[in-house]
Image (cartoon, rainbow, N blue to C red):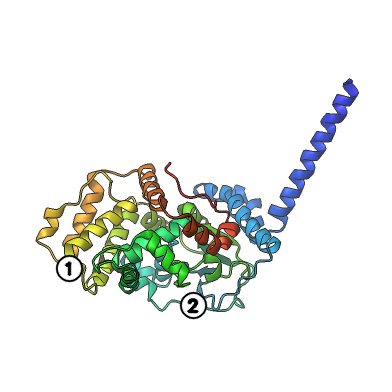
Amino acid sequence: MSDLQRVFKIVITFLAVYIVFDIYIRIHYLSLPDIHKETLRNTNTVRAETCIVQKYITTIWERNSRLRQKCKITKQVLTPTNVTFYNWKNLNYCKVPKCGSTFWMQVFLALNNVENIKDVFGKRRSLYHNNALNKKSTMDHFSGSDVIFHVTRNPYSRLYSAYVDKIYLPGFWGVASEINKRNGKACSQSPSFEEFLKFIMKENFQDPHWQPISEICGSCNVPYNVVSKQETFNNDVQFILDHLSISRRLKKEFLTNLKKKHTENSIKEITKVMIGYAKEAPCLTFIQFCQRLWKSFKIQGYISNLLSFPHKKFRTLNFTNTTAIVKIYIKGTKKIHMTSVMKKHQRQHYLAKAYTGISRKTVKDLKRMYKADFDLYGYSYELPKEH
């Protein structure tokens, strides 16, 4: 090959790369809302602590772009019966259970009651979810500067989380009893994860805790400009809060409760609400309930897998000793400090184990039922594995 040919080849390669890069910029930048383009232009005037948020904009844009492109390519039409948005000034949120909804309900409650923000976190979860906050079921109130978002989650982990919270624990005792009845199991037994999956798919039993997110929030029909993910929840929260007109003090308070106080707050909230459910469960003893709750905290990575259930500490207690029960669980979280990496690995261990042994037919049915969620939000169809 002559020198002239080599030079010509290099020039052609450079032009090809330039054209591809130009197309990428047009797709991922020019088609995005002006509010975010303006933010990017003014990165030099942004406070130092928000630099990480500015860098995160590209990630948010890529998710938004994927959602728009997938909806267009697949001609996905998801017309929900009723999409409800929680609204505060320029913030609009479609609530999705099992995707950090408790935290966002706490945020909305605090935004409407800023003076007593410390009273918002660590309470019974029903106080957040049943509170009469400002809700709208129409998109007419959206403006160009609004943050319109919903949180997504890998269908595999969301389904397992729903199972642990609602079936293994006595969240939905009536559903658990019906599953046991169909499988010839005793009332006090826990339905298996696969029995739960088969039940909701065979009966097409739709509940917001496991209904496809794309159906709940009408992902292809609503002009979302922030697609948040449970897997990057903390970073997404910081990004969204940075686009709200709130004080630095209030933002710091939210982030502190999300990061530093999350485990303790969650244990308080979950224990209180589950005790209420357990009292209504006719054939679940106090000790059985406490053992299941202990394991559920292991599944969530709050308590180390190395710790055994402290049977003696619960022996003298009953359902009325809420404060004492909470203290035992919180003490369990402090016996062996769980780093973020340890929590992640332990959660993944239980998730992978849950899908081990699930029949091929059940997995196939699951993939078909949640196909839109896998495709629209970029989740892999591959079953969970140990890290």
Quarter the C terminus occupies: top left
Q: Which residue is mark 1?
A: 319
Q: Is residue 173 left or right of residue 144?
A: left
Of circles 2 and 1, the one toward us is 1
Disc assigned to residue 135: 2
| Residue 104 seen | no
Examine the image and state in which quarter residue 376 appears.
Answer: bottom right
Query: Disc 1 marks which amino acid?
Result: Phe
Examine the image and state in which quarter residue 162 appears.
Answer: bottom left
Quarter the N terminus occupies: top right
In the image, what residue occupies the spot 38% across and 53% down?
354
Query: Disc 2 marks which amino acid?
Result: Lys
Label 1 sits on a secondary structure element that is loop
Q: Nearer the viewer, residue 272 or 246?
A: 272
x, y percent for residue 378: 58, 54
Q: Residue furthest front?
A: 184
